[in-house]
Image: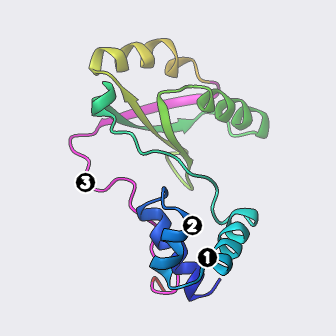
Amino acid sequence: MDRIDGKILAVLQEDGRLTITELAARVGLSVSPCHRRLRELERNGTIRGYRALVDPDAVGLKFQALVFVTMREEDRDTLRAFEEAVAAIPNVVQAQRLFGDPDYLLRIVTADLPAYQRLQDDTLSALPGVQRMNSTLVMKQIVDHRPLPDPRSAR
């Protein structure tokens, strides 16, 4: 990846709805080379897709919790079953496996605290292999959906 590819990624992370003509103008290329580079970034998986960023408050999802999960068992089958079960819960908008303790971090959105309590009681408490869960409520979102930094400048 070179400087031009980095510019393409930076511009698209700010506005993924640009036409190829607009993108080419912003990165200083003609349309054909810009289009070739864009298709290669998509083909090689650097660009994984495009989507709309939806404001959770605007759609009634005003409550967020971070759930730290410590597993009782960490064999392959248990971890696979846990991860598949988590992936099937629509309210889990982010899930990460961590080194150390806790084992997982889940970011969950619901309409309100009672909805979160129902999700906790009915679904999260039944996840396979869980020893302990610790929930922290999100007070305020400070940084969300920030574009990735240029890897050349982050060194």
Please tell me whether mark 3 or mark 1 is closer to you in this view: 1
* Label 2 residue SS: helix
Q: Earlier in the sequence, mark 3 or mark 1?
A: 1
Where residue 121 appears, x then y in whole percent? 44, 13
Say which amino acid is labelled 3: Ile
Q: Residues within 10 Å of mark 1 (few under 14, many from 20)?
A: some
Identify the residue position indicated by label 1 in the image.
31
Identify the residue position indicated by label 3 in the image.
142
Query: Measured along the vertical axis of the image, is residue 131 above or below residue 16?
Result: above
What main secondary structure does the magenta stretch of the protein show? Answer: loop
Say which amino acid is labelled 1: Val
Query: Measured along the vertical axis of the image, is residue 75 above or below residue 22?
Result: above
Count the marks. 3
Residue located at (62% from left, 26% from top): 88
Residue located at (47% from left, 27% from top): 91
**View extreme (right): residue:** 77
Where residue 115 appears, x then y in whole percent? 35, 16
Q: Is residue 43 left or right of residue 119?
A: right
Residue located at (30% from left, 14% from top): 114
* Residue 67 visible here: yes
Residue located at (70% from left, 37% from top): 79
* Label 1 residue SS: helix
Identify the residue position indicated by label 2 in the image.
20
CB-based contact (under 8 Å), mark 2 and mark 3: no
Q: Nearer the viewer, residue 56 or 13?
A: 13
- Residue 5's tag is none
Query: Measured along the vertical axis of the image, is residue 32 above or below residue 84?
Result: below
Say which amino acid is labelled 2: Ile
Q: Earlier in the sequence, mark 2 or mark 3?
A: 2
Q: CA distance from mark 2 to mark 1?
A: 7 Å
Q: Which residues are magenta?
A: 128-153
CB-based contact (under 8 Å), mark 2 and mark 1: yes
